[in-house]
Amino acid sequence: MPRITGGEISPDMLIALGQVGKKYNLYTKITGGQRVDLFGARVDQLPPIWKELIAAGFESGHAYGKSLRTVKSCVGSTWCRYGVDDSVGLAIELENRYKGLRSPHKIKLAVSGCTRECAEAQSRDVGVIATENGWNLYVCGNGGMKPRHADLFATGLDKATLIKYIDRFLSFYVRSADHLQRTSVWMENMEGGLDYLKSVVIDDKLGLCGQLEQQMQHVIDTYQCEWKTTIEDESKLKRFRHFINSEQPDDNVMFVEERGQIRPADAEERKHFKLVEVA
Amino acid sequence: MARWQVVCHVDDLQPDSGVCALVEGLQVAIFYMPKDKAVYAINNYDPFSHANVLSRGIIGDINGQPVVASPLYKQHFNLQTGVCLEDETVTLPAYPVRIENSSVQVSITE
């Protein structure tokens, strides 16, 4: 799944995405993170698919990783009569800043252009809402198995301060949370909770802020699209074939058609195909 | 009697990971740990997810047993015996495998 920063995509990019989906007969669906799933590719098809996507200007969406996923946005002041600030512009800036960041669990952000909150920022690890007085920052929310509304962390921020706080917050989380621990559980298990977190990120109680910002800057400076790196490296491409000693694809991968698109065949449908014996 | 089949060159294996080979119509997942000079082969089919994916699992050890974790639902399989650690009623075929003069060889017994 390629990255579509802030959910903003030009008609040309949409067409390019559609052409790849059509050429490789992929299942396509709009995701909750304002991008497009392309499912049903065989492992050997991934390099040519990504070659085409990258040529069209896309990059890896880090969609399966414990990493930054999406920064959702509403249309903001540019297109909405209620919009107070440019939520799309900020969402794109934040997504480009933190893309590729690896973390204890997936991280999702959102930016709303006003308090009507169409981007649902208060259910994200980091949520930003535009107000007349500046940006309000919310942290440690999530949807999922145990939904949690984010807590208000700071209000009336200018963009530079907002980004500084998010840098420090995410760095601190990445450095100190347990594996597979989301921001909400991380904060709830922290002695002193939200107030303590504020004292570390805003008041620099631990004297760590310089280091946290530096670490985030390093991540930003060393960003790479792993798919671009992979398709340019012959030795890495060796992994993208099903068999090491044959060009055959995996004959256990079977699709049927539903609503005009492919989907994996279920157990009953598989009986009608030639079944693969397992010794 | 065991008949050794040449599958690939040792350089085709992925160090500390797996590859899948087609041997007599069977999908065989081959795992290679160069530091321990160890190579293991089990069937590539994950009975829990009904997919041929085990060669793409992460390898490690649990209580000294070399294992692969299925990339889908994360059950662990002993690489020597094929036994599933979470459900011992499930055992995958494990195959003899060796590296002879850089050639990787698997034996499928009838």
Image (cartoon, grey):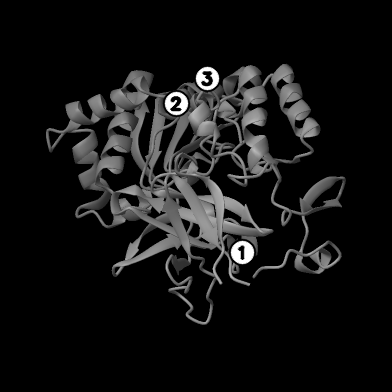
Q: Which mark is residue B49?
A: 1
- Are discs 3 and 1 located on one and the same chain? no
At label 2, which amino acid type do we have? Leu
Which class describes the residues within 10 Å of circle 1: few (<14), some (14-19), or many (20+)?
Answer: few
Q: Are marks 3 and 2 in contact (CB under 8 Å)?
A: no
At label 1, which amino acid type do we have? Ser
Depth-wise, is mark 1 or mark 2 nearer the camera? 1
Number of marks in the image?
Answer: 3
At label 3, which amino acid type do we have? Gly
Residue under the image location 61 percent in, 22 percent down? A54
In this rendering, the answer to whether A58 lies above or below A41 is: above
Q: Quadrant of residue A16?
A: top right
Q: Which mark is residue A126?
A: none
In this rendering, the answer to whether A196 lies above or below B108 is: above
In this rendering, the answer to whether B11 lies above or below B110 is: above
Residue at the disc numbered 3 = A89
Q: Tag 2 or tag 3, which sits nearer the N-term?
A: 3
Q: Quadrant of the C terminus of chain A?
A: bottom right
Marks 1 and 2 sit apart, C-alpha to C-alpha, by 37 Å
Q: Quadrant of the N terminus of chain A?
A: top right
- Are discs 1 and 2 located on one and the same chain? no
